[in-house]
């Protein structure tokens, strides 16, 4: 029994080192190519290709369920947030026209911040309400012109299983702009690389794209948010961590 446990830990350790090695080896040429690629759409396509390559090489190709639910036009994707790799999972899974909204602290990492800027990601600060609302107005104006947006409305994550309360910002803007909300459920990311882990572990990854929620069927941002959150919670198979308090602001 002890030998089996030790062997399992050694296998996980070796896998984790290998996975980080794959990420570094793929990231360096990807960054160099992004530097010389002139258009943002092409940079996003390249990023999607490299993200898929990483997951393929580490044995965790992402299975996409109900992909036909994703609208071809403007929409707002909202997904559960449980891991450092959630953004990479969506980048590998969604079309290249998506703009990702990411917490401001990621901009401070020299290489990662530059990489994210090159693919047109927007950074928002949890502490600066005015900045969040400026970014929200900018993004949803772009969405009305044809762009698609991706948010993690919980705003943060930790190693505790469950779905945290959502912030209202994205849902209020979607309601005003009459842009459909598309809930997405990410499976397997928490077990692979949660907030308390330094090394990834083996495991399958998948996303389920749920039916779009039309804002014209809702009379408030709270109603739109609750419906979206309930749809994710029903599929997630994790506990509801809400305390019934609703946060305002743009999601990060």
Image: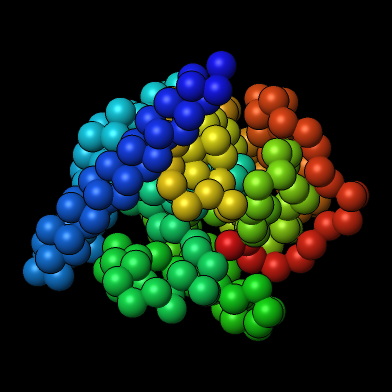
Q: Residue at x 65, y 73 (%)?
A: 126
Q: Is residue 5 visible?
A: yes
132 on left or right of 74? right
Please state the horizontal and vertical placement of residue 231, each as a whole percent of the image.
69, 31
Residue 137 lies, with reference to residue 220, above or below; the image says below
Q: Nearer the viewer, residue 117 or 145?
A: 117
Please state the horizontal and vertical placement of residue 104, each as a whole percent of the image.
52, 74
Q: Residue at x 74, y 48 (%)?
A: 164
Q: Residue at x 29, y 67 (%)?
A: 115
Taking the view exactly as shown, the residue that stands out farthest to the top is 1
Residue 84 lies, with reference to residue 251, above or below; the image says above
Q: Is residue 180 visible?
A: no
58 on left or right of 248? left
Taking the view exactly as shown, the residue that stands out farthest to the front is 2
Q: Quadrant of residue 29?
A: bottom left
Q: Quadrant of the C terminus?
A: bottom right
234 on left or right of 107? right
Q: Residue at x 30, y 28 (%)?
A: 59
């Amino acid at each position: 029994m002890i030998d089996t446990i030790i062997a399992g830990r050694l296998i996980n350790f070796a896998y984790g080192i290998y996975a980080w090695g794959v990420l570094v080896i793929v990231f360096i040429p990807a960054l160099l190519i992004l530097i010389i690629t002139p258009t943002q759409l092409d940079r996003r396509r390249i990023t999607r290709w490299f993200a898929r390559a990483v997951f393929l090489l580490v044995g965790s190709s992402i299975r996409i369920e109900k992909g036909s639910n994703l609208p071809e036009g403007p929409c707002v994707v909202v997904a559960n947030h449980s891991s450092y790799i959630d953004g990479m999972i969506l980048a590998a899974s969604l079309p290249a026209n998506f703009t990702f909204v990411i917490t401001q602290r990621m901009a401070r990492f020299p290489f990662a911040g530059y990489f994210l800027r090159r693919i047109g990601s927007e950074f928002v600060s949890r502490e600066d309400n005015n900045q969040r609302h400026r970014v929200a107005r900018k993004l949803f104006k772009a969405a009305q012109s044809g762009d698609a947006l991706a948010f993690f409305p919980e705003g943060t994550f930790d190693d505790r299983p469950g779905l945290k309360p959502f912030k209202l910002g994205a849902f209020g803007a979607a309601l005003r702009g009459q842009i459909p909300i598309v809930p997405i459920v990410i499976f397997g990311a928490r077990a692979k690389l949660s907030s308390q882990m330094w090394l990834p572990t083996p495991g399958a990854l998948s996303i389920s794209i749920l039916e779009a929620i039309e804002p014209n069927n809702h009379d408030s941002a709270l109603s739109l948010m609750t419906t979206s959150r309930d749809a994710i919670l029903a599929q997630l198979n994790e506990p509801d961590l809400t305390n019934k308090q609703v946060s305002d602001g743009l999601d990060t």
